[in-house]
Image (tube, rainbow, N blue to C red):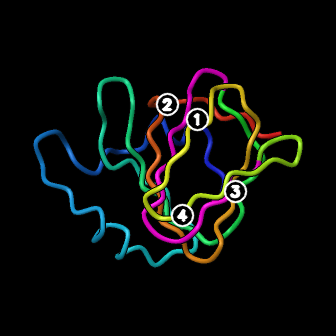
Amino acid sequence: MYSTADNYANEPTKYQALQLIDLATEGGEVTEKYRNMVINRVNDHCLRLAVFDEVYGWHYHPTSDELFIVVSGCLVIDLEGERELRLLPWQCATVPAKTVHRTRAIGRTVNLCFERSNAETIFV
């Protein structure tokens, strides 16, 4: 399930600028247990759509913040020190660069993530 920065560097962008994107349809069509795709790019950042119902391992991004926006389900962002952020639909939170965290889906969860393109991911 884990992707590396090298995987992300070669990942295609599903939609180019000036195209209408139906995010509800994109999320609804995912049948895999885990899918994380680049939907669009904005300058040196990308918008990802992730659908999963698992735990994504502990990691951090040395040079990129991550903005998470939950579309459906419940996304828990675990932080060091046993702190957690629990996001419900249409709630969002930003995880600053260098912050060790992991994400957990409570049931099937669809979220958007805005981050620097090709952001390095370090698993711990």
Labels in figure, total: 4
> How far apart are the two marked residues, 1 and 3, measured between alpha carbons?
15 Å
Q: Is residue 81 left or right of residue 61?
A: right
Question: In which quadrant will I find the N terminus?
Answer: bottom right
- Where is residue 87, by image quadrant? bottom right
Picture disc at residue 101? none
Which residue is label 2 attached to?
Answer: 118
Asked if the residue under mark 2 is in contact with the one under mark 4, i.e. CB atoms within 8 Å, the reply is no
Q: What element does badge 1 sit on?
A: helix
Q: Earlier in the sequence, mark 4 or mark 2?
A: 4
Q: What element does badge 4 sit on?
A: loop
Q: Is residue 81 left or right of residue 84?
A: right
Q: From the top left corner, tell me how far across and down residue 63 is, in percent.
A: 60, 21
Which residue is label 4 attached to?
Answer: 88
> Which residue is depicted at the point 56% across and 26% down?
64
Asked if the residue under mark 2 is in contact with the one under mark 1, i.e. CB atoms within 8 Å, the reply is yes
> How far apart are the two marked residues, 1 and 2, measured between alpha carbons?
6 Å
66 in the magenta segment: yes
- Where is residue 59, by image quadrant? top right
- Where is residue 45, by image quadrant? top left
> How far apart are the two marked residues, 4 and 2, measured between alpha carbons?
27 Å
Extent of the magenta region = 62-78
